[in-house]
Image: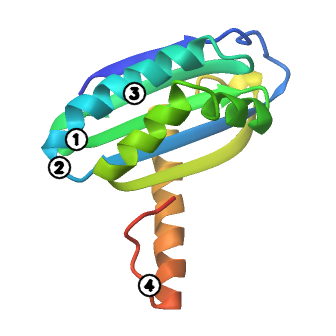
Amino acid sequence: MPTIPWRGGPDARTEGAQITVMASRFELQNARAVPSFFVASITAWWQSLHAEGCVGVSLQARPLAREFWTVSAWTSKEALYSYARTAPHTGSARRQTAGMKSSAFVFWEVRGSALPVSWTEAKRKVREQVARQRAASDERGGGPERTT
């Protein structure tokens, strides 16, 4: 399983600051979607490393499982959203939705000294978020096709 280890962004020196962490999981519909998603994820990773407000980022690809994970840290949620609205991420994200089976995002706050966040913690938080969303969807009588 290829993993790009944690790498600091332009705002990496934030030991005492309150930091916004985002973890995400993307599950693709089929193997045909994997190559383009892989390229798009590397492009987004590279972009994030140069984005204002990025404290750090890591990417994990499980191409045979059609699954991609990210964990990133930002000086604020606004900095993260600004990055997400900027090309190439914004266009790439729109193009990749056709091949997506599900996606999940979770946000939480940590002190800068707690970085990098472990993959175990990030994945646990995403799975808990997905379980909460599925339970809420089941209560409403809907199916959890997309968990965003």
Q: Amino acid type of disc 2?
A: Asn
Q: Quadrant of residue 61?
A: top left
Toward the viewer: 1 or 85?
Answer: 85
Toward the viewer: 128 or 78?
Answer: 78
Q: Amino acid type of disc 1?
A: Ala
Identify the residue under disc 3. Answer: 41
Disc 2 to disc 1, C-alpha distance: 6 Å
Identify the residue under disc 2. Answer: 30
Label 2 crowding class (10 Å Cα cut-off): few <14, some 14-19, many 20+? few
Q: What element carries label 1?
A: helix
Q: Are marks 2 and 1 in contact (CB under 8 Å)?
A: yes
Q: Is mark 3 on a helix, strand or loop?
A: helix
Q: Which of marks 4 and 1 is nearer the N terminus?
A: 1
Disc 1 to disc 3, C-alpha distance: 12 Å
Disc 3 to disc 4, C-alpha distance: 30 Å
Image disc number at residue 142: 4
Image disc number at residue 33: 1
Q: Are marks 3 and 2 in contact (CB under 8 Å)?
A: no
Q: Where is residue 58 in the image (x, y as percent from the top left)?
A: 48, 23
Image disc number at residue 72: none
Q: Which colour scheme is used?
A: rainbow
Q: Is mark 4 on a helix, strand or loop?
A: loop
